[in-house]
Amino acid sequence: MDFVLHTSDSRGYANHGWLEARHSFSFAGWYDSKKVHFGALRVLNDDIIAPGKGFGEHPHNNMEIITIPLHGELEHKDSMGNLGVIRSGEVQVMSAGSGIFHSEFNASTTDNISLFQIWIFPNKTDVSPRYDQIEYKLDPSKSQLIPVVCPKNKTGTKEQTWIHQEAWVSLGNIIKTDALSIDINTKGNGFYIIVIDGIMNIINQQLEKKDAIGIWNTDQIKINTNSSCSFLLIEVPMLNF
């Protein structure tokens, strides 16, 4: 088993006034040669966007882009004709494929929105662009792990969507004194876990809010906690990208 620890304060940081951004991996004007990607995981941004502000229309191609609001509402518009709002408790997936333009704005004129945006390298290039949005239910009163994004043809419920990669994105809770054992879905993949709230212990490492750890060369991990915690778990292929 191998691992790399990324503490919250080791992330890249940018404050643009309307946008406060923290980057787990090199992004925009922030570069760290040791933090370019984790396997197929290229971007994990932790953003806070001011009321009414956001990203104007811009292009993407050949990237699987996943947006998970933690608090607030985000308005999405794209060149495929999709227009809508995603909220906390929902996940948005966009396969940029052969090329797409989109914009993302805070839908509220009074409140900030906080969100994760994830970019994963696809296993197929120049596919037809695709957009999807799903709702999930994570029960805060019990320990559980819910996969919300899966590889194509491996979704099992209406609370899951898919991407062009042998990767999973899951949200989890662990209630005080509980533990979760998590098996790898595809041999050779690695886990990247970031704490949303609370404190957890994994492979004898204590992680607090927004700390993260990447783990590979294992088929299972076990997460313990002495206080309730919530987290995001991303399982990705560990090939060089």
Image (tube, grey):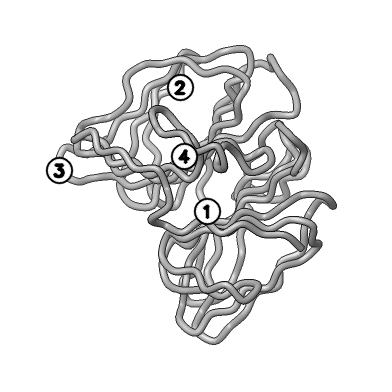
Asked if labels 1 and 2 touch by Cβ distance under 8 angstroms, the answer is: no
User: Closer to the N terminus: mark 2 or mark 3?
Assistant: 2
Measure the C-alpha gap from mark 2 to mark 1. 20 Å
| Badge 4 amino acid | Gln
Tags 4 and 1 touching, CB below 8 Å: no
Task: Single out the mark in the foreground, 3 or 4.
Answer: 4
Give the distance between the C-alpha atoms of the residues marked 3 and 4, in whole angstroms.
22 Å
Q: Is residue 38 left or right of residue 228?
A: right
The numbered mark, 3 or 1, whose residue comes first in the sequence reads 3
- The mark nearer the N terminus, 4 or 1, is 4
Q: Residue at x 33, y 47 (%)?
A: 114
Q: Quadrant of residue 154?
A: top right
**C-beta proximity under 8 Å, tags 3 and 1:** no
Q: Nearer the viewer, mark 4 or mark 2?
A: 4
Tag 4 or tag 3, which sits nearer the N-term?
A: 3
N-terminal of the two: label 4 or label 2? 2
